[in-house]
Image: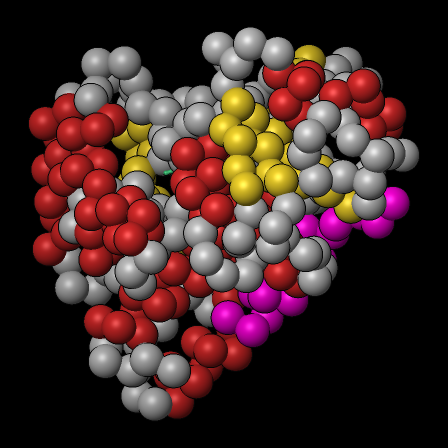
Amino acid sequence: MQLIDGKKTAATIREQIAVDVKELLNKGGKAPHLVAVIVGNDGASHTYVNGKIKACELAGFKSGLVQFDADVTEEKLLQTVKELNEDDEVDGFIVQLPLPDHIDEKKVTEAINPDKDVDGFHPTNIGRMVLGLPTFLPATPFGILQLLEHYNIETSGKHCVVVGRSHIVGTPMTLLMSRKGNPGNCTVTMAHSRTKDLKEETLRADILIAALGKPGFITKDMVKEGAVVIDVGTTRVADATKKRGYAVKGDVLFDEVAEKCSFITPVPGGVGPMTIVSLLKNTLISAQRRQGLES
Ligand code: GUN
């Protein structure tokens, strides 16, 4: 079994991004500028956003954070999106999800200028991804593709099973693994909460991508010998032995599943760091495009 080290891979990619930023500056350009918008006090969302801002600093980006209380109106949030769309200094921005129930997430996503939608969630960018046109790929699936590539994991002709159908991970992942290219060319099954015999499906997976948000859900008996297992789960579970009072758990019961795998991602330190670095990559691309200084 080989452990897929997302932290190390992300650090390598981030170093390359930092080199690209220097090159952009040497050509007379400006550092990429990413802004994150966050609503409310959800601890996990704040952790993710802080990680994104910190990564910006490490890569030489300019970053900004817009914070609202949970009771901010949809109108106010849409106004902020409009201002960020129009702010020439901003290359890309994200609105951290989930949003409180009184705000229509779809409406907010659709209000973002697709050219600054470095999350790749706008319908235009999803459509471009489906058609294989240049676009911003959603950060988590993009990060997983880069991990597969970095570890030279063969995907062509393999059976990939994606568990979960979220717009952020499961749906784009399914599409990207099936499309022509490397990584890609898989036969893909998308499984979800209504799948009849999930174990029957997961046991067919050469590559199993778990993105359902249920800690420890994927057990040894659900995994084929020699499978590649990618764990997207990051659920906070109460743990009194930890300083913070919780541990972050993946969707895969790592200790028992790892022994059956050819490759496996840990949680934390697997997919998470790659998500952040992919967001930086998208923002760099946006900055290069906007300044007409593509490398
Ligand atoms: N919430 C969970 N993952 C993401 C992400 O990649 N982008 C945003 N905006 N919100 C998220």
The magenta stretch is 1-17
> Could one spot residue 44 in this view of the protein?
no
Identify the residue at horizontal 32%, vertical 28% (top origin).
Answer: 39
Q: Measuring from the top left, give residue 263's x and y in whole percent.
A: 78, 46
Q: Measuring from the top left, give residue 194's x and y in whole percent.
A: 48, 10
The color scheme shown is: secondary structure
**Relative to the observer, which residue lies in front, 233 or 160?**
160
Indicate the quadrant containing the C terminus: top left, top right, bottom left or bottom right: bottom left
**Relative to the observer, which residue lies in front, 25 or 153?**
153
Indicate the quadrant containing the N terminus: top left, top right, bottom left or bottom right: top right
Please say whether residue 268 is one of the residues in the magenta stretch: no
For residue 38, side relative to residue 213 (left or right): left
Main SS, magenta residues = helix
Q: Measuring from the top left, give residue 268's x and y in whole percent.
A: 69, 37
Identify the residue at horizontal 70%, vertical 56% (top origin).
Answer: 153
**Relative to the observer, which residue lies in front, 192 or 107?**
192
Identify the residue at horizontal 84%, vertical 34% (top origin).
Answer: 225
Identify the residue at horizontal 37%, vertical 25% (top origin).
Answer: 98
For residue 60, side relative to residue 14 (left or right): left
Position above or below: 218 against 46: above
**Relative to the observer, which residue lies in front, 201 or 45?**
201
Image quarter where ligand 1 lies: top left
Please say whether residue 5 is one of the residues in the magenta stretch: yes
> Could one spot residue 283 in this view of the protein?
yes
Residue 214 occupies which quadrant of the picture? top right
For residue 147, side relative to residue 216 (left or right): left
Position above or below: 261 against 133: above
Q: Measuring from the top left, give residue 232's x and y in whole percent.
A: 59, 34
